[in-house]
Image (cartoon, rainbow, N blue to C red):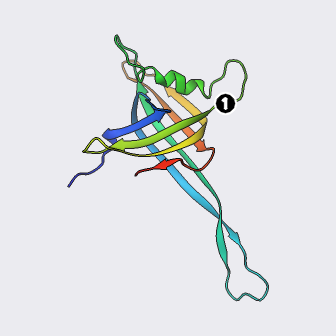
Amino acid sequence: MGYYSGGDGLMKVGTTTVATVTTWSFTASQETLDITTLGDRDRKLVGGTRSVSGSASISWYSASGATAGDKMASTLMGNLIKLDGSVSDQVALTLGITDYGTDEKSITMTVILTSIAMTSSQGEVLSAEVSFEAADAPTALTL
């Protein structure tokens, strides 16, 4: 029996894999709307607005022969950090894992990046914590 592990994590912006994902998570939630009317003996609820938010820890480096994926983290950050004062971009983001059969198990959604916290320690790999909120319903789900 195979198990999924964090070592198999992936994050894509569009179709390009972003560096190395060490951890990722997302939370999907839904509000409830009370539709109880006068005369009802029991409270009645229906589903309301849904939302998805999450975060990921990524690591990357720049080395001789670096691939487009190795350099993608700067593109990811460029969607939130704007030097010209413009509005942050929406990003097509995929989070998931690659299973034992090399199939991707993932969720894809258009997100707005809400924060990026970078960490650099001497002798360590450059890393960042990325937080996001979905701008719409997920477009694909194969988890």
**Few, some or many C-alpha atoms within 10 Å of disc 1 (few <14, some 14-19, many ≥20)?**
some
The percent position of residue 12, horizontal first and vertical second, equals 46, 34
Tell me the residue at 52%/52% (across/down).
27
Quarter occupied by residue 131: top right
Residue 33 in percent (x, y) is at 69, 68
**Image quarter for residue 7?**
top left
Q: Which residue is mark 1?
A: 88
Q: Residue furthest right?
A: 38
Q: Which residue occupies the extreme top position in the image? A: 64
Residue, x 62% and y 29% (percent of image)?
80
Q: Position of residue 89 (x, y in %)?
A: 64, 31
Q: Residue at x 67, y 18 (%)?
A: 83
Q: Quadrant of the N terminus?
A: bottom left
Q: Which residue sits at x=54%, y=30%?
A: 117
- Give the side of residue 44 with respect to residue 74, left or right: right
The amino acid beneath tag 1 is Ser
Q: Is residue 123 above or below residue 41?
A: above
